[in-house]
Image: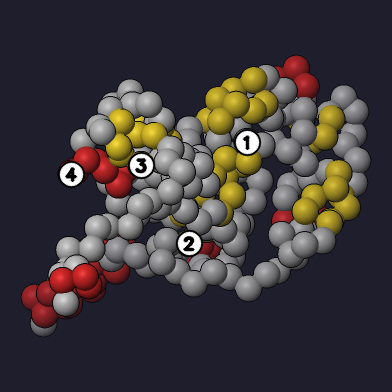
Amino acid sequence: MRRRLAALALLAGAMTLVAFLAPACYAPEFSACSVRCRLTNDCPSGFACLDDKFCHASTSDALCACSPLRCEEIPGSCGNIPDTCGGTTVCPDCTPPLECGAGGTPNVCGDPSSCVPQACAVDESCGPSVDSCGKPRTCPDCPNGKKCDNGHCVACTPDCASGDLACGDDGCGRMCGSGMCPDDRWDCHSSGICCIRSGEHCNPLPEGCNCCPGLFCINGICQSASGCAMAPNLGPDDSDL
């Protein structure tokens, strides 16, 4: 009987350990749509802050429905805070000597003598900007599908011409193609395609169609032409009929 009870206790302990170690399980206090990350973009280990400003166990989770932020959800909150639903939440003023945002966290009362700047928000902050303590900083580039706009990553759709000669800005702050034209005879045309400039050498066969718009490869040089003559009539002459 004692052996049986001991075996049952061991089995129960093993099941508890497995449940504790099981991956992708939410702890009760970290259930879906319960932990916000609006101010710092920080989440518990294993969680990610998504565009809905809630912590998620997976980046593939569905976004949470919009729930207006309340002052009491942020200890020490102050000032006017975007409520994440398009409105504004007005929180009380700080008690001196604390000042709103002076500790380095926006909209939270802090001591101006011990400001700790926030790190660049991953995939949110970009380029030269000012940190939460008023000092200059430079954040990494935005990920694909976003561009940098006044220090913030915003969604965009890359727009490039097709083919190996694509060039120029893709509209998202990156270069189309390799970012370089084949050699110094070529320019990146406003159409977003590399082409050979006027007066530059061109090879009629592989490069004849690559002169810039309005130019033709004539005698091995890209140049303008007043018009194209019709090909000679290679059929029988009417006078011979």
Mark 4 belongs to which amino acid?
A: Leu
CA neighbours of label 2 inside 10 A, class few (<14), some (14 to 19), many (20+): many
Residues at marks 3 and 2, CA–CA distance in whole angstroms: 58 Å
Give yes or no for contact between labels 1 and 4 (Cβ–Cβ under 8 Å).
no
Residue 167, position as x, y percentages in the image: 40, 40
Q: Nearer the viewer, mark 3 or mark 1?
A: 3
Q: Is residue 50 left or right of residue 106?
A: left
Q: Which residue is under mark 2?
A: 56
129 or 121: nearer the eye?
Answer: 129
Q: Residue at x 60, y 57 (%)?
A: 53
CA neighbours of label 1 inside 10 A, class few (<14), some (14 to 19), many (20+): some
Mark 3 belongs to which amino acid?
A: Phe
Q: Which residue is under mark 4?
A: 205
Residues at marks 3 and 1, CA–CA distance in whole angstroms: 44 Å
Q: Say whether disc 1 or disc 4 marks the residue closer to the N-terminus.
A: 1
Q: Which residue is under mark 1?
A: 151
Q: Which residue is under mark 3?
A: 216
